[in-house]
Image: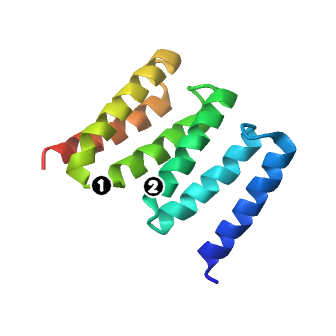
Amino acid sequence: MGNGVWAGYCYKWALKSTERRYGLEHAKIAEHVRNLGNIAWEYGRLEEARCYYARTLVINEKEYGLGHPIVLGNIHDLGKVLYEIGSPIGNLQGVIKYYKEMLMKFRKRLGREHPYIKELHDTLKRYLSMEKF
């Protein structure tokens, strides 16, 4: 059994155990779900990773609010997997739209000069530069 398979098994066990203890939407759940998303991402199981990352985002946004750094990381995780699903050109417009929406929400909450705004803006610029090809 490879390390990724073993890690996935351990994270799934930890997730089930944590869900029984805290419920399905507790912040402690999000860490295990994101780890499962990372494993799925590493092994090219993109649709599975998308589901895990989307669940993580929903849980953390409820727990911490949209302006929290953890939520920004979750948005980035979901954005990268959305980009990879399907052909890059076919999905690029959807990813750009997604990042623009997130950028507007974060600017409203954090202000234009916040470091997380710069990070999100830089990511959006990378995707926009890909659109030209």
Closest to the observer, 95 or 122? 95
Image check: 49 left or right of 27?
left
Residue at 48 percent of width and 47 percent of height: 77
Per the image, label 1 sits on a secondary structure element best described as: loop
Residue at 46 percent of width and 63 percent of height: 45
Residue 113 visible within the image = no
- Name which of mark 1 and mark 2 comes first in the sequence: 2
Image check: 70 left or right of 129?
right
Residue at 13 percent of width and 44 percent of height: 132
Residue at the disc numbered 1: 86
Q: Residue furthest bottom?
A: 1
Residue 83 visible within the image = yes
**Residue type, numbered disc 1:** Gly
Residue 71 percent location from the top left of the image = 57, 36
Q: Would you place residue 26 above or below residue 66 in this image?
A: below
Closest to the observer, 17 or 131? 17
Image check: 110 left or right of 125?
right
Residue 102 percent location from the top left of the image = 43, 28
**Residue type, numbered disc 2:** Glu
Residue 27 percent location from the top left of the image = 73, 39
Closest to the observer, 49 or 38? 49
Quadrant of the frame with the N terminus? bottom right
Residue at the disc numbered 2: 47
Q: Quadrant of residue 21?
A: top right
Residue 99 percent location from the top left of the image = 37, 34
